[in-house]
Image: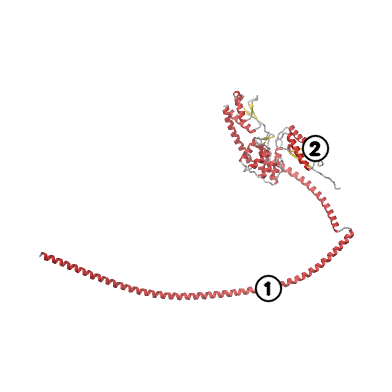
Amino acid sequence: MPELSIGFIVGAVVVILALIAITALIVWKSAIAYRIKVGEAKVGSAEEKAREIIDDALKTAETKKREALLEAKEENLKAKNDLDRETKERRSEIQRYEKRVLAKEETLDKKLDALEKRESKLSSKMADLEKEKEKVEELRQSHLSELEKISGLTSEQAKDYLLRTVEEDVKHETAVLVKELERQAKDDADKKAKEYIINAIQKCAADHVSEATISVVPLPGDEMKGRIIGREGRNIRTLENLTGIDLIIDDTPEAVILSGFDPIRREIARIALEKLIVDGRIHPARIEEMVEKAKKEVETLIREEGDAAALEVGVHGIHPELIRLLGKMRFRTSYGQNALKHSIEVAHLSGLLAGEFGADVRMAKRAGLLHDIGKSVDHDMEGSHIQLGVELCRKYKESSLVINAVEAHHGDVEPESMIACIVQASDAISAARPGARRETLETYTNRLKQLEDISNAFKGVDKSFAIQAGREVRVIVVPDQVSDDDMVLLARDISKQIESELQYPGQIKVNVVRESRVVDYAK
């Protein structure tokens, strides 16, 4: 019985599984059939919609086509109308132009006819004039021949006679006029020159103090003299050896005299000695230290003096080395006149005169300030201060105007500009001020007399004059005894004789003049 129930259960389970399988198959087939039906329905509706869309598109395209055709026809019609209107306007304008051209052609034809008539009249008049000209020429020739018979001269001879007469009259009148103009010009020039120079001198009045070759250092007491001399004179020897200056310690109370021709070295010695006196410690090592400090102070003072001079004059852009050399001129003298103060004064005078003459004031001041720059190095280098100054100005790129002014301020070369002449005059004014320079009258007159005696000793010399404070000698020769070629040799011989017999600073210009004169009087 148990086996029977188990078989029953298994059979029931198999039957149930079979039923489930059959049911599932039926359901699957039904679903497939439904899907197919639904898909066919959708396809049919899609085809229907597609046909509707196509129909609508065709209708729309047909409508658009008709509208486009209508618009094209309208545009074509409009363009045709515009073209017709423009064509009518162009035709009317061309017709107006044709009328104007025809009118101008008619006017030109009328003018041509008038010109042709005038030309024919002129041709006939020209022919008449030619005939009249021939008649006049015949009459002139006949009159000329009659005049030649009456006067006994040909036409060329008469022309030469008239020209000679007129030429002589013109020469005489010209000579009289030129002489009068020269006299008037000289009078006016002298008057104006004096006026300009007086004004410049009055505007630039300066005080002058003659420089000396000694310096005096005051002492706090006479016992300081022994300390300065030192044991066995070692202190004074050290100071003299380091500075190159002679110390004169004599009976002068409370003073030491410093003597030397070089003002810079004398100034270094003075400053060093004053520092030693204040310090109180005087021995060789201390002296060397103070001398070095004094050298630095003097160098600083030199640059400050150069800057102050350029600033006072109002000249800028000068090379720093030239500024330093200007400062060195503070310690340079010429016949007792301070070289830096002289240069400053010349610069001021040059500026004032340039303003009067309408020249470049700045350039005149610059040339005046640098005209004696060679004096700052003439103790150390060979050559005159003019040659040295020219070399320095060229070295430090000064302008050609300044270089010529430096070279020509003593007449060594011809001045090439108004500036050079102004500097030359200003230098003479500054040097000629009363008290500006000192020289014993005897030495001065002897030198001038020697110059004239040397020149007069040569054969053919009529007379000679020492001018420019002895810087130039002008020799007048007899024209019958000395030719132009002999003048060159004579000038050279005189210069060589002066070089061998005289001692002088700078250069002396020998100017030989040969002049022939013919004098006559018109009565």
Which-is-in-front pick, marks 1 and 2?
2
Tell me the element at label 1: helix
Would you call the spot at circle 2 few (<14 residues within 10 Å), some (14-19), or many (20 or more)?
few
Give the left or right position of residue 502, taking residue 138 as reference: left
Residue 323 lies in what quarter of the image?
A: top right
* Whether label 1 touches label 2, CB < 8 Å: no
Using residue 149 as the reference point, say whether residue 185 is left or right of it: left
Residue 372 seen: no
Identify the residue at horizontal 89%, vertical 59% (top origin): 150
> Residue sitting at 15 percent across and 66 percent down?
10
In terms of depth relative to the viewer, which is nearer, 450 or 329? 450
Which residue position holds label 2?
Answer: 459
Point out residue 236 in the picture as x, y percentages from the top left corner.
61, 26
The amino acid beneath tag 1 is Glu
Q: Which residue is mark 1?
A: 105
Picture coordinates of residue 319, whole percent (x, y): 62, 42
